[in-house]
Amino acid sequence: MKMPVVLVTPLANGDLGLKFGYPTPDGGCQKMDMTFTKGTTEGQFSNPAMAQTDIRVAFTDYQHFALLYFETRKGGLRNVWLQLYGGRARAPELFPEGAQKMQLLAPQVGLNPSQGALLPKSDQCAGALSQVSGPAGPAPRDQ
């Protein structure tokens, strides 16, 4: 399993458009489009199709990283996770400040920081997504 590429584009109505590229074992790229619907609070979104009831931009510096908090509620179960997105498709390096913020936030949302995983870096899908969609828009805003 390798690190996916994600292009985030703010939409005119306040929603976020996301294009994901997941590297496949055969060297290809599985693409997926998703929209996060704007919530009532700045930086809050939802994705009802995936039962993601609360998506928040926890931290971002608008250039190097964005740390997102996800919560799902389905069948009476609540799941929480954090995802750290780094840079642009052309520079998917991990930004140290983002990793530090993730380590600090994890216990505050009930997660064990030592159980996280960083996937190996891959630019396998970067070209495929940027050819289709052009450059990514600015990162979402802090709350």
Image: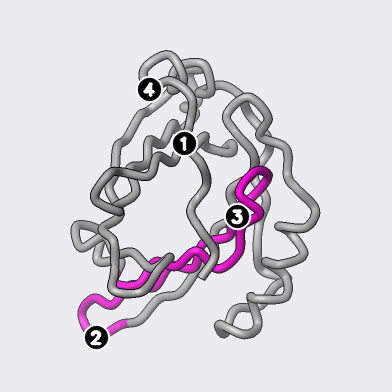
Secondary element type, mark 2: loop
Residue at label 4? 133
Label 1: how many Cα within 10 Å (few below 14, some 14–19, many 20+): some
What distance separates the C-alpha of mark 3 from that of mark 1? 17 Å
Q: Is residue 97 left or right of residue 38?
A: right
Looking at the image, tell me whether mark 3 or mark 1 is earlier in sequence order. 3
- In the rendered view, would you say 126 is above or below 4? above
- Name the outermost residue toward the right: 96
Q: Position of residue 141 (x, y in %)?
A: 51, 58
- Tell me which residue sits at (46%, 27%) in the image: 24
Residue 76 inside the magenta-drawn segment: yes
Instruction: Judge by depth and name the residue closer to the eye, 40 or 1.
Output: 40
Horizontal arrangement in the rendering, residue 103 relative to residue 19 (left or right): right
Q: Amino acid at mark 2?
A: Gly
Amino acid bearing label 3: Leu
Q: Based on the displayed image, in which of its 4 quarters is residue 11 positioned? A: top left
What span is in magenta? Answer: 53-77
Residue bearing mark 3: 84
Residue 62 placement (x, y as % from top left): 61, 49
Within 10 Å of the Cα at label 2, are there few (<14), some (14-19), or many (20+) other Cα atoms?
A: few
Q: Is residue 63 left or right of residue 6?
A: right
Calculate the distance from the C-alpha at mark 4 to the C-alpha at mark 1: 10 Å
Q: CA distance from mark 4 to mark 2?
A: 37 Å
Give the residue type that dot 4 points to: Ser
Which residue lies under the disc numbered 1?
137
* C-alpha distance separating marks 2 and 3: 27 Å
Position of 85 with respect to 80 (left or right) is: right
Secondary structure of the residue carrying numbered label 1:
loop
